[in-house]
């Protein structure tokens, strides 16, 4: 499992770990205030503070070394603290042959002692309290919701960066890199640049997932449900073309009509344009040519809010979609943004429909891959979308979880578009399939017939799994 909670949280079952998060936050806050208010020359008191902190570590059963390693984030402050005695103002004193500014030395000590104690107190709080619990503690303390949201996003971004850094480190080490050797420093430096880009891209995907659940960055208004056009199809796409900002043309004129209640698989080889197409259905991507209409309402900037309520997009990677402290809050995120009524009832119903009621109060980060996928689906179902768009829903699922997901989707009474490479899954879920390649629809028909056309599959780099037979 990835996440900053592994880096800053030292899981355990000590009395310190069990203390209520809001109590720990208050104690830590008070302790930091106490440290800051202590006159810098009462040296003994700083020693006492340190002893108290070490005593808490001992009760919490977290090794001293664990904290020492993480305290390296202090290095810039330590460097500053050591420079002040050298460059500080007069009067100066002679210390082992060096001319030292007295005021500079005291200022340096002040920064070093208070900064170090502040960092150690914060690390102690983080080590003994899971990130989700910290956020819950802030809620108990009635910290304003926008601040908690910002803290949540910071935590999520921290996880993104740490997760990417870990994956890259493993990839480097598994190819013979040894970070202890100086001549490997070049690889490390290059990977820091890549880390920045990859974290940015991951952060962007998390943002897209938030936007597609109605996040605008400002408080939600009430829902204004736009009247539906009764005879209109669930989805009508006409001549949709799109190029990415770097000029890469991904769609060259996609046409598609989906009737209400249909379940349609979107098949195609890697890079065919399937995800790009899916992201157009609720206006996450726009700016190309052609039109997309959902239940008669055209996807335009003016209609985006209603379109996003109508179209539920379940992203390929649940980690892009889930970012709140608890499962229940993640599922509530969309309905709140859309200003829907009875948010709690919607959350319960959505979690019940995916069999995940029991995990409502847990952190999404602590769930298995299959559970996360279910919760990601619930987070979209809670918005009661008319059109459900799922990107690679069966990817990375064990066979049982995959079968359970299939049963769950079959039980849902919705219009559905399932982007997938899993051809047997497409056959099981979707009576109809469209095949996209090179940014256009190259085949459209009953799934069984599409999959039975071995020439068509071969021309578009699709293949049924070994041993799979269409009966
Ligand atoms: N952000 C981007 N900037 C530039 N080009 C992109 C971007 N995202 C995707 N593309 C390109 O657009 C094309 C279509 O990509 P898309 O992700 O839609 O394909 P896909 O059919 O979903 O592929 P896969 O099955 O591998 O997920 C590809 O050639 C891809 O390289």
Image (spheres, rainbow, N blue to C red):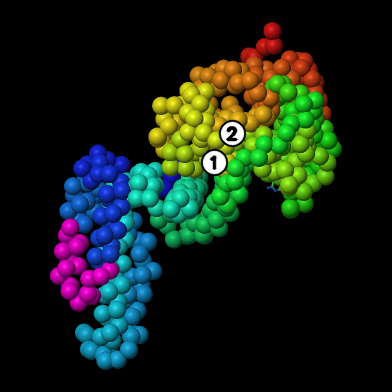
| The magenta segment | 36-52
The residue carrying pointer 2 sits among few (fewer than 14), some (14 to 19) or many (20 or more) residues within 10 Å by Cα, namely many
Relative to 271, 88 lies left or right: left
When asked about the image quadrant of residue 242, the answer is: top right
Q: Is mark 1 within 8 Å of ligand 1?
A: no
Q: Position of residue 35 (x, y in %)?
A: 25, 66
Residue 374 appears in view: no
Vertical side of 301 occupied by 462: above or below = above
The residue carrying pointer 1 sits among few (fewer than 14), some (14 to 19) or many (20 or more) residues within 10 Å by Cα, namely many
Query: Does dot 1 land on a helix, a strand or a loop?
Result: helix
When asked about the image quadrant of residue 421, the answer is: top right
C-alpha distance separating marks 2 and 1: 9 Å
Query: Does dot 2 land on a helix, a strand or a loop?
Result: loop
Please name the residue shown 64% across and 37% down the image: 309
Relative to 262, 327 lies left or right: left
Name the quadrant of the C terminus.
Answer: top right
Vertical side of 103 occupied by 72: above or below = above
Vertical side of 45 occupied by 398: above or below = above
Relative to 172, 417 lies left or right: right
Q: Position of residue 356 (x, y in %)?
A: 46, 26
Which residue in the structure is indicated by mark 1?
A: 336
Which residue in the structure is indicated by mark 2?
A: 383
Is residue 470 highlighted in magenta?
no
């Amino acid at each position: 499992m990835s996440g900053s909670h592994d880096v800053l949280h030292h899981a355990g079952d000590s009395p310190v770990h069990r203390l209520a998060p809001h109590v720990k936050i208050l104690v830590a806050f008070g302790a930091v205030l106490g440290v800051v208010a202590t006159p810098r020359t009462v040296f003994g008191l700083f020693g006492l503070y340190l002893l108290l902190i070490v005593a808490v570590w001992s009760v919490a059963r977290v090794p001293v070394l664990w904290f020492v390693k993480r305290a390296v984030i202090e290095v810039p402050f330590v460097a500053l603290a050591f420079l002040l005695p050298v460059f500080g103002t007069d009067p100066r004193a002679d210390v082992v042959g060096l001319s030292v500014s007295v005021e500079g030395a005291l200022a340096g000590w002040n920064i070093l002692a208070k900064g170090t104690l502040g960092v150690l107190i914060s690390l102690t709080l983080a080590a003994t309290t899971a990130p989700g619990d910290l956020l819950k503690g802030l809620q108990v303390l009635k910290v304003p919701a926008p601040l908690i949201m910002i803290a949540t996003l910071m935590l999520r971004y921290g996880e993104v960066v740490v997760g990417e850094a870990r994956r890259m480190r493993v990839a480097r080490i598994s190819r013979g890199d040894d970070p202890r050797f100086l001549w490997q420093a070049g690889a490390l430096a290059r990977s820091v640049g890549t880390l920045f880009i990859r974290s940015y891209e991951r952060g962007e995907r998390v943002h897209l997932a938030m936007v597609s659940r109605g996040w605008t960055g400002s408080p939600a208004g009430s829902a204004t449900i736009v009247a539906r056009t009764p005879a209109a199809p669930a989805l009508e796409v006409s001549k949709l073309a799109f190029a990415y900002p770097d000029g890469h043309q991904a769609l060259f004129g996609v046409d598609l009509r989906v009737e209400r209640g249909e379940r349609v698989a979107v098949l195609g080889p890697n890079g065919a344009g399937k995800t790009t197409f899916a992201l157009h259905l609720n206006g996450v991507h726009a700016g190309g040519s052609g039109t997309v209409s959902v239940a008669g309402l055209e996807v335009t900037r003016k209609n985006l809010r209603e379109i996003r309520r109508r179209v539920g997009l379940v992203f390929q990677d649940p980690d892009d979609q889930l970012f709140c402290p608890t499962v229940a809050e993640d599922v509530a995120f969309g309905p709140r943004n859309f200003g829907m009524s009875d948010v709690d009832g919607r959350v319960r119903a959505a979690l019940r429909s995916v069999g995940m009621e029991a995990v409502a109060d847990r952190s999404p980060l602590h769930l298995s891959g299959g559970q996360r996928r279910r919760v990601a689906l619930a987070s979209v179902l809670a918005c009661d979308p008319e059109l459900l768009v799922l990107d690679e829903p069966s990817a990375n699922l064990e066979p049982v979880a995959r079968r359970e997901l299939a049963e769950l989707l079959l039980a849902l009474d919705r219009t559905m578009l399932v982007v997938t490479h899993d051809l047997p899954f497409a056959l099981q879920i979707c009576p109809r399939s469209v095949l996209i390649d090179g940014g256009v629809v190259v085949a459209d028909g009953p799934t069984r017939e599409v999959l039975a056309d071995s020439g068509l599959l071969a021309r578009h780099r699709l293949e049924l799994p070994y041993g799979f037979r269409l009966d």
